[in-house]
Amino acid sequence: MLKRDPFEQYAEAVLLISVLHRRQRAVTEHLKAFPEIKLCQTINGDYELMCRVKVPQLEDMAAVLETISEIPGVERMKSVVVLATNFDRSYTETASLASLQAAGIDRGEAG
């Protein structure tokens, strides 16, 4: 059984938020007030915003989601709880595989 550090974040979810027309900026400003929201991005598709939410315990997630759902302009939400993080490159420089391979070919490392 894995032992968790009690001082680390325990539960994480991806939250998709559908926003009423012309309310995205106002909703985003409200979301900034939530310390549990670690990332908020504009996306395309059926939802306008995607947020990463972290709370100390899974039981805390429901209260945060309920409060977010009450923000004026939030039409609907969908949440997905993260079960495990297999790897995280959020804090590393971004380079595409193609550019790395091209750099290797330029140095004579083809193969």
Image (cartoon, rainbow, N blue to C red):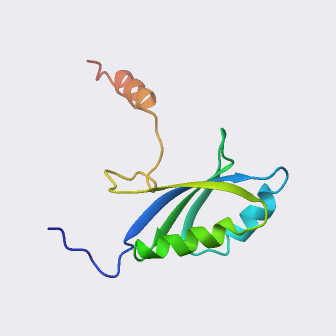
How many labels sit on residues? 0
Image coords of residue 56 (percent x, y): 42, 77
Instruction: Identify the image quadrant of residue 35.
Output: bottom right
Instruction: Identify the image quadrant of residue 70.
Output: bottom right
In front: 100, or 29?
A: 29
Instruction: Identify the image quadrant of residue 36.
Output: bottom right
Which residue extends farthest bottom?
A: 7
Looking at the rendering, in which quadrant would you find the C terminus? top left
Looking at the rendering, in which quadrant would you find the N terminus? bottom left
> In this rendering, would 22 be left or right of 105?
right
User: For the point 35% across and 76% down, which residue is it?
Assistant: 8
In front: 73, or 31?
A: 73
Image coords of residue 85 (percent x, y): 34, 55
Image coords of residue 38 (percent x, y): 54, 66
> In this rendering, would 74 be left or right of 63?
right
Image coords of residue 52 (percent x, y): 52, 60
Asked if 33 appears above or below 48 in the picture, the reply is below
